[in-house]
Image (cartoon, rainbow, N blue to C red):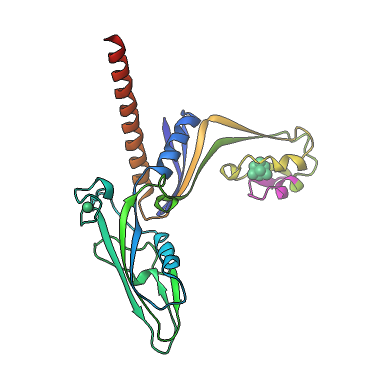
Amino acid sequence: MDIDIIELLPNSVKFILEDTSIAFANAIRRIAIAEVPTLVIEDVYVLKNTSPLFDEFIAQRLGLIPLKYDADTLELNFRDECDCNGIGCNLCTVTLTISKETSQEPAIVYSGDLISSQEGVEPINSKIPIVKLGPNQALELECMAQLGIGKEHAKWQPVSAMGYQFYPVIEIDHEKIKDPKKVADACYRNVFSVKNGKLAVENLLNCNLCGYCTDFAEPGGVQIKYDSSKIIFSFEINNGMPPSKLMEKAGEILLSRIDELKNKLEVITTSEEE
Ligand code: SF4
Ligand SMILES: [Zn+2]
């Protein structure tokens, strides 16, 4: 299997997987979304809340704030598997607090007001609004962040968008195209251009195989096909984990699942033989 990186940004990546199957791409996608652990606020202890929002409302907002977490520098246990029996300790829980109050001027409580007990754990963006405090209002909270997976609740998903498609193949019959500009303008993803009066493919990888442009060409003038041996994969990370790290974790989990299946099959085969 070959991997060709097309675009690599700090929080997103687009690459081509070659000589693989759609089943493999889907397995990686499902594991990355649902099984790679991330750290998110789960419990909130409200010490003081005179803001306009109910405690539950604020707790729900806090749970949706993505937190930076590097599993290599901070090893945490799942809370229900920790030696503390799920009570919460330094090995499974990170505490974040907020303490903010206003005098005469109103103020917004932002994610950046969360103070973490653990170096390296902080909101990915300090400008996520939590609640607006009016004059003489206060918010004082203690939040417990813990590891979880997207299968349990979507707030633990490390990615906000993850998808794939087959590699596009666009065939143009120049003899049949009477108005190349009309076809080029029809594509809302700027796949085509017109060069020397002829329709040309300018940005092939922008094509999402929708087929819309074929309605603007004469029959057979433009054919949208795909190469099923190549898959364009793209995703966007929401917790600051490098994209390569997410893929590495998803791969490790996939391999451990295969080992698990292999071991179970061996046990069944052995017991049948006995
Ligand atoms: S199939 Fe859709 S995205 Fe691709 S070139 Fe045609 S209109 Fe553009
Ligand atoms: Zn613990």
Ligand 1 found in image quarter? top right
* Residue 117 screen position, x and y as percent: 24, 65
Instruction: Name the quarter where the C terminus is drawn.
Output: top left
Determine which quarter of the picture holds residue 89. bottom left
* Residue 148 screen position, x and y as percent: 34, 49
Image height of 67 relative to 100, above or below = above
In the image, which residues are magenta?
183-197
Q: Residue at x 27, y 50 (%)?
A: 79
Q: Which of 233/122 is in front?
A: 122
Image height of 51 relative to 239, above or below = below
Image height of 155 relative to 266, above or below = below
Q: Residue at x 41, y 47 (%)?
A: 150
* Residue 260 screen position, x and y as percent: 31, 28
- Quick check: is 151 in the magenta stretch? no
Taking the image as shown, residue 220 lies to the left or right of residue 78, namely right
Q: Residue furthest top?
A: 273
* Residue 231 screen position, x and y as percent: 51, 35
Q: Residue at x 27, y 47 (%)?
A: 80
Q: Which of 10/51 is in front?
A: 51
Instruction: Name the quarter where the N terminus is drawn.
Output: top left
Taking the image as shown, residue 195 lies to the left or right of residue 258, namely right
Determine which quarter of the picture holds residue 129. bottom left
Please state the total of marks drawn on the protein image.
0
Q: Residue at x 34, y 26 (%)?
A: 261
Image height of 64 relative to 262, above or below = below
Determine which quarter of the picture holds residue 227. top right
